[in-house]
Amino acid sequence: MREWERVDAGSGRLFTASLELVGKRWSPGILLAVARGAARFSEIRATVPGVSDRLLAQRLKELELAGLVERQVIATTPVQVRYSLSPRGDDLMGSLRPLVAYGARWAEAGSSACTPSRPPTHESSRHVRPAQP
């Protein structure tokens, strides 16, 4: 087996942890909204249709704790809170932008990016071993 074909447990765990972090419901949309300039809670909520206030607040806190989003409190009356991507979040978005572009290309083609264009056949969906003599 060639070196590039091996996936060690550490690499697998890191990859899985990264996917789990950004794969939670609403997190990708929130990150994308902040990356595109939505800074205030109300702006993010307006940019991510369907997310409730409670869930948006929860996800923003999780993304902040993960070091992907920075929260800045501005001492005005009333107090303003602004969100922005941290350097770590900006780095992550650099990795996710090609995935966003991939989804957009497939949506333009009239197909969901994650839906096969035709259902797999029985033979193509699993490896079939030849019969032993």
Image (cartoon, rainbow, N blue to C red):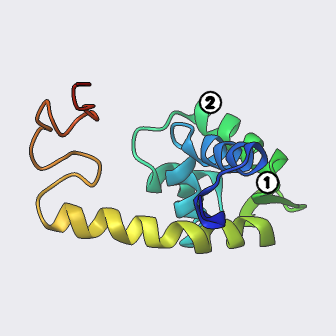
User: Which residue is rendered at x = 90% and y = 61% of the image?
Assistant: 75
Residue 86 in sight from this viewpoint: no
Q: Nearer the viewer, mark 1 or mark 2?
A: 2
- Estimate the x, y position of residue 90 in percent, counting from the top left: 69, 72
Instruction: Return the disc, 1 or 2, that comes first in the chain's sequence.
Output: 2
- Estimate the x, y position of residue 110 in percent, counting from the top left: 11, 59
For this view, does 87 lie left or right of residue 126? right
Numbered disc 2: secondary structure:
helix
Q: In front here: 69 or 120?
A: 120
The amino acid at mark 2 is: Arg
User: Which residue is rendered at x = 63% and y = 40% of the image?
Assistant: 20
Farthest residue, direction front: 133
Quadrant of the frame with the C terminus: top left
Q: In front here: 71 or 7?
A: 7
The amino acid at mark 1 is: Pro
Farthest residue, direction right: 75
- Estimate the x, y position of residue 23 in percent, counting from the top left: 55, 43
How many residues crowd mark 1 within 10 Å: few (<14), some (14–19), many (20+)? few
User: Which residue is rendered at x = 19% and y = 47% of the image?
Assistant: 116
For this view, does 32 lie left or right of residue 8? left
Quadrant of the frame with the N terminus: bottom right
User: Which residue is rendered at x = 60% and y = 47% of the image?
Assistant: 19
- Estimate the x, y position of residue 9 in percent, counting from the top left: 74, 42
Quarter where residue 113 is shown = bottom left
- Residue corresponding to mark 2: 54
Quarter where residue 102 is shown = bottom left
Residue 124 in sight from this viewpoint: yes
- Residue corresponding to mark 1: 78
How many residues crowd mark 2 within 10 Å: few (<14), some (14–19), many (20+)? few
Numbered disc 1: secondary structure:
loop
- Per the model, the C-alpha gap separating discs 1 and 2 is 20 Å
